[in-house]
Image (cartoon, helix red, strand yellow):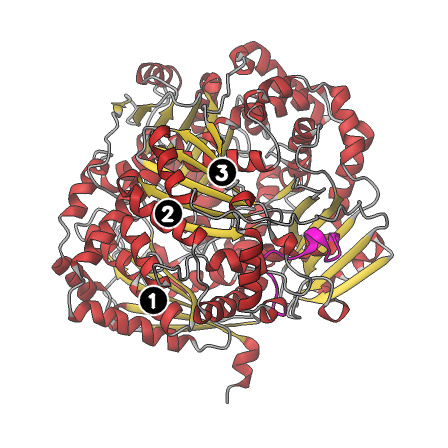
Amino acid sequence: MKKNWLRIATLAMVCVACMSFVGTPALAQEFPVSERTLKNGMKVLVQSDHSIPNVALYIFYRIGSRNERPGTTGLSHFFEHMMFNGAKKYGPGELDKVMEANGGSNNAYTSQNVTVYQDWFPRSAMPLIFDIEADRIQNLSFDPQKIESERKVVASERRSSVDNENGGLLDEQLWATAFIAHPYQWPVIGWMSDIEHWTIDDLKRHFAMGYSPSNATMVVVGDVTPEEIFQLCEKTIEPIPPHAPPPPVTTVEPPQLGERRLVVHKPAELPLLMIAYHVPQTNHPDFYATNILRTILFQGESSRMYQRLVDKDQIALDVSSSVEPAFDPTVAIIVAQPKQAVDPEKCEKSIYEELERVKLSTITDQELEKAKNIRLMEFYQQVRTINGRANTIGTYEVFDGDYKKLFDAAKNYAAVTKEDVQRVAKAYFGANNRTVASLLPENEEKAKP
Amino acid sequence: MRASKKCSVFLNLLVFIFPGALSAQSIHIPPHEKVVFKNGLTVLLLEKHGVPIVNFAALVKTGSVADPQGEEGLASITAQLLRKGTQKRTAQQFAADIDFTGGSFEAGAGADFSTVSGEFLNKDLTRGLDLFSGALMHPVFPQPEVDKLLAQSLDGVRAAKDEPRAVLGTYYDAYLFNGNGYGRTPDGDEISLSRIHRDAIMKFYESYYAPGNIILAVAGDFHTVDMKKKLEEIFGQWPPKPVTPVIIPVIPPVKRNKLLLVDKPDATQTYFAIGNVATAAGDPDRVAIRLVNTVLGGSFTSLLNEALRVESGLTYGVVSAFDPRKAPGPFGIYSYTKNESTVQALDMALQILQKLHKQGITAEQLASAKSYIKGQFPPSIETSRQLAQIIAINEFYGLDDSEINDLEARIDAVTPAIAQQVIQKHFPADNLVFTLIGKSSEISAAVQKYTEKRDARVIREPGFWPPPAQK
């Protein structure tokens, strides 16, 4: 993430916080989306909404930390920062200055899979925004001085989201242990020693690899017409020549054959527990059943895990789960915040018992209906703002291959049966498929024999 | 000078390439209606169709400032317990019923007021209203739920202390107001929470959750006439009772510099806040203050961000912010930097503040802040959830719709001269309160130079400020 440090940091910092998973359904209102593929291969999706005089513009580049190599981990994220540090027409610092002076703001995020640039602006700034975006896709400059100062900024970002945040620290260790072959094993922000050693040539290579217009999808939602956006694109973006997309990521994570465990010792008030289970990628048919399962287990105070760990056993403050949108098979992560002095293993035991319960007997009809209602509400919450809609349309387009899948989500959730939920619980949430990470407060640990 | 050269470049662009950018847009809040029921409940209704959701936002005009000394967190605990058992439902039934609708119910307390809010699909309106009103009007505070929540909140404070940026503001406010008024920590601390009992919670509820002390805003997909009738049937039955208003102490700005260093021995960065007591909500200068603060530290191109992040790479983030409340609230510059550059970052932030006082802001900076605020405002009133909260809060602070409808005109009216006056009047210059969380053994000596008065705490020690023994 480029900015907004006051936004409360959640666990996987650079990635999870920003890419809260997009799923959902119901015969919720459809909204018309116009699409065009430019001659250079960039796909543009436009949705008009004149309720406020503003526009949200997202550009999704299909490049993230999965496209990196050991030694230059974190490069995608660092590059994201550099995209704000000057091109040909808008030099260092000018992009932000011109944008803000015209009422606009911007941000960006990088995940394991994508790098996403976001602009929010009044309609009046539209030509400017396209001018800026075209300039930096085409003519990014690599000022050695800016690289050095931005390197320090990213180091500071890492210090706050990993070194000084237990959740970020444990999350990093969890991924590094759950994956032994696939690039999901390294952190999006990069290892500190890699942050310290990237070179200007690494950045140039990354730009050449990932930033072809054909490797991007643009989504524009708000006070615009599709025609005017397509016209602007023809003028500013379409002339930019395409080149080869990033080479495919061919490494496949081998099946996990037994439980992996790791411990982090650190001065802390409270312990922390994270458990990762390998699950398929976003466009896999089991996506919907897995989400229904996670909803029933984790969402709301009536969920099974909350009722068990927080309400009944009273051993945790909070228990939740997350799955990031992913091109490749990924992990579903369970996070439990044990109470002070509670052994995380106690939380583990309760979590495993609840998982066994969904495997042994099917969930109730009432639970299934509840989960579908929760997903419906989430859908409305995601699409009720121009910003949320831009993100949702883009996420479906990029991760499911077609934004229209967004409108099928209702049908796909409706089709999930109790037996499906039971099946995915058995298929993915077993002992051999899990990695368990515990953070143990140092003081407490010393007391142990 | 480098900076001015950049400015002129962007000004050219502004004038010659994108002249439309500064043209006025019209920002308006949708029409809404206000009714006061016989029992004193203020009801605000705002219809907004398109998404089939209805939002309720009840603002109870009493917040954590009313917490008794030593029982900080009481307002917050009371609010959070509303859903944990009502006359009709146990906590578990309440959770099951809310979750089944896909809706949500949240309650909490800030400094000036407590909030209770609900969000439901309009097809579930009847059930939603029953849940929402049941929690607001008929909570029963079962002892086991009280015990559970208090134990969780206690650990919640401890968990927050594992993350310096989660508690920086808490330490800063507590130290700035020296534990009085807005120095009461809204979520309580390890000691105050252990002192709260069910009797005190019941008493807090009985004293302040009264129709005459509540503003209920409803926004979303409904018809006003029907909704008013429904609300009258449910909330009109709530018996009125007198409420003794809470006197919020007006605490003047701190006259003598002081610094609190909170030791977190494993910290690799120093988290800091610098500022003083500043303005109250509704201050006549509020729009000009917001503009100047946008230039100082309220945007990415702000003076502070330009210096501490863009030019020097000392930090990932720095902001300055006012938090206007009933009585004067805090102003602060908030940032962090690695241990070794603590003094460099603090010095730089102080220099920027001094420069602001000496040189003021340029016409270009002011113009940019004007466009920025105008351009970024509409998405803040986009959803019925935002609108319900905004109309309730404005009503509480005695602000009317002109707050939004006249915003552009008020922004346009701010001249460089007015900005200059506002800087002198509202932005602290020499008298500053510092709060630092970091590795004391590495930074303590270096930060000695800032103040004569020094205070110290260790993050693991219970409480924030003052230390429990001094209370």
Secondary structure, magenta segment, majority class: loop
Residue contact between numbered discs 3 and 1, judged by CB atoms under 8 Å: no
Observer-nearest of B41 and B98: B41
Q: Quadrant of residue B409?
A: top right
Q: Is residue A355 left or right of residue A188?
A: left
Structural distance between the alpha carbons of marks 3 and 2: 45 Å
Residue matched to label 2: A20
Label of residue A307 in the image: 1
Q: Is residue A395 visible?
A: yes
Q: Is residue B128 magenta?
A: no
User: Comparing marks 3 and 2, which lies closer to the viewer?
Assistant: 3
- What is the chain identity of the residue bearing mark 2? A
- The region drawn magenta spans B176-191
Using residue B448 as the reference point, say whether residue A110 is left or right of it.
Answer: left
Closer to the camera: disc 1 or disc 2? Answer: 1
Residue beneath the point at 65% across and 47% down: B245
Q: Is residue A449 above or below residue A55?
A: below
In the image, residue B288 lies at what x, y percent? 69, 26
Q: What secondary structure is marked by label 1?
A: helix
Q: Tell me which amino acid carries mark 1.
A: Gln
In the image, residue A30 lies at what x, y percent? 23, 30
Q: Amino acid at mark 3?
A: Lys
Q: Chain of mark 1?
A: A
Looking at this view, is B36 or A151 the one in front?
Answer: B36
Find residue A293 and report its image quarter: bottom left
Q: Residues within 10 Å of mark 1 (few under 14, many from 20)?
A: some
Q: Residue at x 49, y 21 (%)?
A: B28
